[in-house]
Amino acid sequence: MSQIFDESGKVIAGTVVLAGPVIVTKLKTENETIKAIQVGYGERKLKNVAKPQRTIAKKYGKDGFGFTYLKEFSTKKGVLPEVQLGDSIDVSTFAEGDTVEVSAISKGKGFQGVVKRHGFKGGRRSHGQKHSEREPGSIGAGGKQKVLKGLRMGGRMGGDRITVRNLKVVKIDQAGNQLFISGAIPGRKGTLIEIVSR
């Protein structure tokens, strides 16, 4: 994350994102209608690319390099994308002030208790309590004699696909292929993210 100042001198907190370029590597069609688009992003040595992807890498990648990621996106019904095989999609797709939604895999936080994981209040801090400030309390099994599925308890936290909506594109750096997006986005440094214009 970083911060930027607008024309009035107001500071805006946001995240700097390296966005592309991504290359269109495949157009999946059905009855002459494009159903999905496959794009490639990143660089890795050709010897480290899986054999099924090497033909794509040799066709659209740089000499001796393949794509780190190959992702597929389905198109909207009745909307034909204006792209051709080999086209490059970069930050010029966006404009300053655009509203976007960002999806990514959140940071893994390991095994966490109910206070951090679900926002439980915990036990009272008065006298008579012993080591129960952050305990869940009764789980209310009743007559079932089992722990019900989906019960909010301690467990592994993070590592989920998270989507943050209504973020604004504040600044675009065409030369560096960077976007400055207002607010925080899920994931650690280096996480692959998906940015969708709304």
Image (cartoon, rainbow, N blue to C red):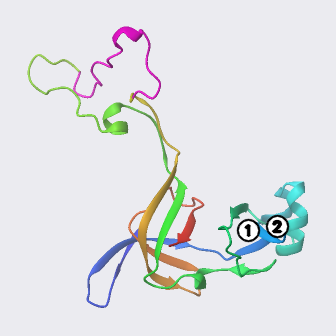
Q: Percent x, y for residue 80? A: 71, 76
Return the x and y of residue 71 as percentages of the image width and height. Answer: 71, 61
Kind of residue at disc 2 = Thr
The residue positioned 84% from the left and 74% from the top of the image is: 60
Image height check: is 150 above or below 71?
above
- Front residue of 114/97: it is 97
Q: CA–CA distance between discs 2 and 1?
A: 15 Å
Helix, strand or loop for disc 1: strand
Name which residue lies at 32% across and 17% down.
140
Is residue 42 found left or right of 12 in the rendered image? right
**What SS does tag 2 mark?**
strand
Residue toward you, 66 or 163: 163
Q: Which mark is residue 4?
A: none
* Residue 169 shows in this picture: yes
Residue farthest bottom in this picture:
7
At label 1, the amino acid type is Val
Q: Earlier in the sequence, mark 2 or mark 1?
A: 2
Q: Which residue is the site of mark 2?
A: 29
The disc at residue 39 is: 1
**Which one is nearer the viewer's eye here, 39 or 44?**
39
Q: Residue placed at 30% from the left, 39% from the top? A: 119
In the image shown, does 117 or 151 lie closer to the viewer? Answer: 151
Query: Looking at the picture, how far across and down is residue 91, in whole percent?
Result: 59, 81
In the displayed structure, would residue 193 be above or below residue 168? above
Between tags 2 and 1, which lies in front?
2
Residue 143 included in the magenta stretch of the image: yes
Task: Please tell me how crowded label 2 is: few (under 14), some (14-19), or many (20+) other residues with Cα within 10 Å.
Answer: few
Residue at 71% x, 82% y is 82
Q: Which residues are magenta?
A: 132-151
**Crowd band around label 1 with a 10 angstrom C-alpha radius: few (<14), some (14–19), many (20+):** many
